[in-house]
Amino acid sequence: MSKTTVNVSTVPREAERTDSARSVGGSRAFALLLMITGAAGLLAAWIITIDKFKILEAKAEGKTFTPGCSFNPVVSCGSVMESDQASVFGFPNPMLGLVTYAVVIGVGVSLLAGARFPRWYWLTFNAGTLFGVGFCAWLMFQSLYRINALCLWCCLAWVATIVMFWYVTSFNIRNGFLPAPRPVKNFFGEFTWVLPVMHIGIIGMLILTRWWDFWTS
């Protein structure tokens, strides 16, 4: 009686190939989250871009323009918009947001329509959100400790980017596109919301302590 032999070494490779070729869609809630966070970021980028152009136009005419979200020396959108950090790539930063947040909305709409995407797509999308949250972290540091002013619309974009980053990362971990041990997958399956809440909470505490004397005066 002949025995069937199985080459065990080929099983992981075949599973890896299958996983790489697998296309996955998102839930309705995940699609709506991407659409909402993308829309929030797009709104912030749009308003900042308009105000930036108004500032430049006023300067060209020898006038001054104060954005509507400039309330005091700390909450001063104009100070942030006129800083060197506001055009780190040679053009106003929010113009980058106009493109990237629109892409996020597009992904959300596609998922809501039933689209499914392969592993490389989700990892690329995750890399984009990672760049976004990293860039926001740099802007936060610059705003708090170099420019010494806050822009409320920038804060909205930060929050939107942080939320989408953690939920896209959670999606990839839960679907096996990012390697993680079982306890980590279980955590992301139940408590993804904890991470953006903690992340935003830390930023809130930094803002509170940075201008504690101002807030309490």
Image (cartoon, rainbow, N blue to C red):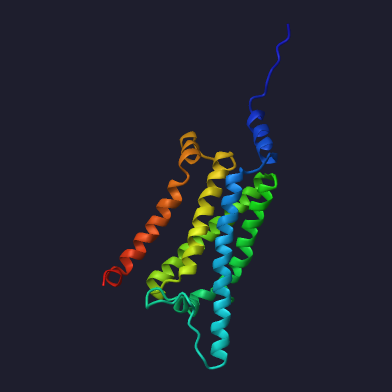
Which residue occupies the extreme bottom position in the image? 62
- Residue 143 lies left or right of residue 41; in this view the side is left
In the rendering, at what x and y percent does residue 115 appear?
Answer: 70, 46
Which residue occupies the extreme top position in the image? 1
Count of residue discs: 0
Q: Is residue 209 above or below residue 166?
A: below
Which residue is more in the foreground, 101 or 139? 101
Which residue is more in the foreground, 1 or 75? 75
Tell me what residue is drawn at x 68 percent, y 37 percent.
17
Tell me what residue is drawn at x 48 percent, y 82 percent.
66
Q: Quadrant of residue 151?
A: bottom left
Quarter placement of the N terminus:
top right
In the rendering, at what x and y percent does residue 19 appear?
Answer: 65, 37
Which residue is more in the foreground, 21 or 193? 193
In the rendering, at what x and y percent does residue 162 appear?
Answer: 49, 56
Q: Is residue 27 above or below residue 156?
A: above
Q: Is residue 4 above or below residue 178?
A: above
Q: Is residue 62 above or below residue 85?
A: below
- Residue 204 lies left or right of residue 107; in this view the side is left
Quarter placement of the C terminus:
bottom left
Q: Quadrant of residue 53?
A: bottom right
In the rendering, at what x and y percent does residue 214 appear?
Answer: 30, 72
Which residue is more in the foreground, 56 or 178? 56
